Image (cartoon, grey):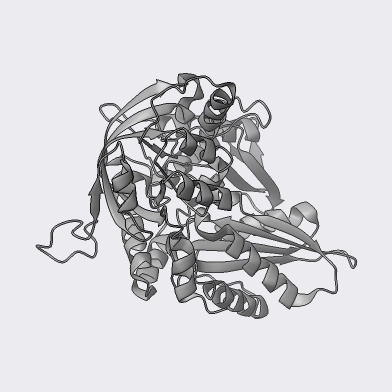
Amino acid sequence: MVDYPRKKGQPRGMDFKRITPPLTEEIVEGLRAGDKVFISGTIYAARDQAHKRMFELIQKGEPLPFDIGGQIIYYVGPTPPREGMVIGSAGPTTSSRMDEFTPALLKAGLKATIGKGARSSEVKEALKRFKAVYFVSVGGAGALLSQRIKKAEVVAYPELGTEAIRRLEVEDFPVIVAYDMYGGDLFKEGVEKYRKV
Amino acid sequence: MRELSVDRIREEVKRLCIEGAYILEEDVQSALKSAFEREVSPMGREVLTQIIKNYEIALEGVLPMCQDTGIAVVFVEIGRDVRLDGSLEDAINQGVREGYEEGYLRKSVCHPITRQNTGDNTPAIIHTRITEGDRVKIKVALKGAGSENKSRLKMFNPTAGVDAIKEFVVDTVREAGGSVCPPIVVGVGIGGDFEKSAILSKEAILRPIGTPHPDEDIAKLEEEFLEEVNKLGIGPMGFGGTVTALAVHIEVYPCHIASLPVAVNIQCHADRHKEVVI
């Protein structure tokens, strides 16, 4: 995926699946925990405060600020962009803080989230129930991931600053399937292999 | 008496904040490269590859290595023969303000209840100490919340012993899992009182990787704890692997006969710390 261990002449990301949102049920069905995936197309950035607000809208039966059907939400709060750049550093934030809001969003049609770290059993159950997937991108790799974001536009809650909802256009955005819709769990399976206690 | 302008302190704090966000210290760079060599899990190596590539991009000075450019934690040691011409805290906060603005860093500091952002990443967390001599030493850490959130503190019974402490450290790392951006540095503060143990644990993560505690017995404990932590198999980003922590650093301080405070502070792989002596 990146240049460091790649042998000369070997093309980038040969072992990556490629997907473009909006995600259909067929796309989600084809993803398994541990799969490396490149996302190209539109995704949405939202984190803590935006989730709280969207959750409240759902509870009140009001429409969300964007059409969430088949979409991917990326848990990110970028650094400010320099002149001439679309976005600053933009790596994932801890997903578990969004856990209490996520099942409601999945029920409303959200098909995938991108963040880092393990999540609650409620989220895992909701992924199975609503046929959705949880991706992880490499935390702390905000500079690398920023280079795969080609456009960024605030679509809601500009007053939240870095926490505003943004529409991002990404190209070959590298993620790994952490939880699939079958209950597959990369963290659990991976750690089991190397645990010595 | 040595006269020192607080403007110099402002200037240095600003520089340390900006450099901290873009230039990963050599000790962390080599620890990550060595982790890549040691890691046996293919997914772990993939993650470390991205981590190394990422800090290399950040070294170019355009994109900070992580979007969470943290809250600024500043440790200042002021020699008692130094006389400042103004407010130390104001100078530090002004340095942070300018560094975060001019360095294009994220302003992540807000009111704890209203969540209203202060807009300039101030106030910093400032720890000051008066020392001998006429120098001023400033250490700045840009501390991200992902790892800070999983830090813990426990007041043990004084009879608990080393094994109980070790178990607490290992449990803390296990529960933190992949969300704290491993491979991590684990800072452990043992002793003092409630807040002293927490400050010790933060000072522990500021010690350069590869520098064991000067007390041989404590250094031995650091090795032992590190080995235990790495048996957890959490690995880079929690995908499984042999390198969960790059180092365990322990600091100790005498405590009350009735208590044994232990604090564990977790530092992600974007281990941004800088220091200067003026």
Q: Is residue A100 above or below residue B157?
A: above
Q: Position of residue B39 (x, y in %)?
A: 38, 73
Q: Nearer the viewer, residue A153 or A58?
A: A58
From where the camera sits, is residue B85 visible?
Answer: no
Q: Nearer the viewer, residue B132 or B191?
A: B191
User: In the picture provided, is A167 more to the left or to the right than B239?
Assistant: left
Q: Position of residue A26 (x, y in %)?
A: 29, 47
Q: Position of residue A104 (x, y in %)?
A: 53, 36
Q: Which quadrant holds the N terminus of chain B?
A: top right
Q: Position of residue B53 (x, y in %)?
A: 29, 55
User: In the picture provided, is A64 more to the left or to the right than B61?
Assistant: right
Q: Is residue A60 above or below residue B150?
A: above
From where the camera sits, is residue A141 visible?
Answer: yes
User: In the picture provided, is B128 more to the left or to the right than B155?
Assistant: left
Q: Residue at x 45, y 40 (%)?
A: A75
Residue found farthest to the right: B258
User: In the picture provided, is A55 more to the left or to the right than B154?
Assistant: left
Q: Residue at x 33, y 69 (%)?
A: B42
Rendered image quadrant of residue A155: top left
Q: Nearer the viewer, residue A105 or A131?
A: A131
Q: Is residue B220 above or below residue A63?
A: below
Rendered image quadrant of residue B163: bottom right
Q: Nearer the viewer, residue B278 or A190?
A: A190
Disc tally is 0
Q: Residue at x 65, y 29 (%)?
A: B111
